Amino acid sequence: MTTTDTKTADLHINERAWALADDAARRTEELRIGLDVLGCGARVIDAGVRVPGGLAAGRLLAGLCMGGLGHMDFATLTIGGESWPGVQVWTDHPAVSCMASQYAGWQIAPEGYFAMGSGPLRARARVEKELFERLGYAESGPRGVLVLETRTLPTDAVATWVATKAGVAPEGVTFAVAPTASLAGGVQVVARVVETSLHKMETLGFDVRHVVSASGTAPLPPLAKNDLRAIGRTNDCVLYGGQARFVVHAGDTELAELVERMPASASSDYGTPFYEIFKRYDNDFYKIDPLLFSPGEIWLTSATSGRTFHAGRINVDVLRASLYEE
């Protein structure tokens, strides 16, 4: 399906996320998060670097990542006949909340620092020019929120670099930070179960603005001993345990073809724990088949005909090996 030049309405995701951050700043002890204001004026919410963080902090990060337009809560999932702890995510604004906000598409790389940036400030900076042109989405407000998956808290230099790229003053930037191997970090990564599906649709050339609503579930990984193991476990929760459902404005023939290419199992790299795949490619994400990154099971429902198309499955054996048998 080809894209159009239709402009998406401004949904004020930075203001929505800023309000969530303000609320969190009043609840630091409850959420077990840290709060700091850098010399340049940027605000930093620490959800797991120097503080414990936790499940509630992870839910906060997921909400910030989705610009206040996506919703995440905890749920008990049935996988392989057993009860598993998990997350449930839904949004009525998939293209904006997932691709214009939650997708980790901005490389934060001033000298001496690196992290991938998620969250609504991406829609202000629009560094990923081609993606935002396809989405037809932009924001122009004076402030915004950026979520970083890293063990290194941003400095004044990092904040100034980000603010300059985004076209805002440093005091108009709020960072929220957690490493992958933290309770909050694990939650916010598996809460991308819908976003990874939208990103794969994008990769396959489908216009994600035609997705009306989306929901998904993924198991919650146990805390890993280090970030590398945590990257493996969190990815496996989506690739082998994730399920996602979409209502789409598209015809039956198009959806029947699309759904077969959507699950992680459509990739040649599918079938072993992600930690092993990652090591096989020398810890380089960019060497892995990009079609691997999507949930294990997908349902697409046509908003036109009402028919539903399904592909993929949960792979409980790989999931158990990754989460409990290493």
Image (tube, grey):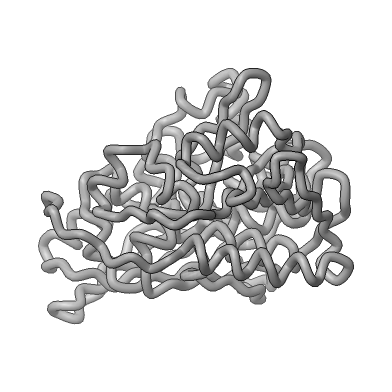
Q: Is residue 206 left or right of residue 201?
A: left
Label total for image: 0
Name the image quarter holding the C terminus. top right
Residue at the spot x=58%, y=49% of the render?
146
Residue at the spot x=37%, y=49% of the render?
199
Q: Is residue 127 left or right of residue 153?
A: left
Q: Can you name the residue that lies furthest to the bottom here?
A: 306
User: Who is closer to the viewer here, 30 or 142?
Assistant: 142
Residue at the spot x=13%, y=79% of the render?
305
Say which quarter of the image contains residue 73.
bottom right
User: Who is closer to the viewer here, 25 or 303?
Assistant: 25
Above or below for 53 versus 165: below
Above or below for 271 versus 114: below
Above or below for 71 versus 264: below
Q: Is residue 263 left or right of residue 75?
A: left
Residue at the spot x=77%, y=55% of the render?
183
Q: Is residue 317 visible?
A: no
Q: Is residue 193 left or right of residue 225?
A: left
User: Who is closer to the viewer here, 163 or 308?
Assistant: 163
Residue 154 coordinates in the image, percent (x, y):
71, 37
Residue 136 coordinates in the image, percent (x, y):
24, 54
Residue 266 coordinates in the image, percent (x, y):
35, 44
Say which quarter of the image contains residue 148.
top right
Q: Is residue 5 visible?
A: yes
Say which quarter of the image contains residue 19.
bottom right
Residue 271 coordinates in the image, percent (x, y):
50, 40
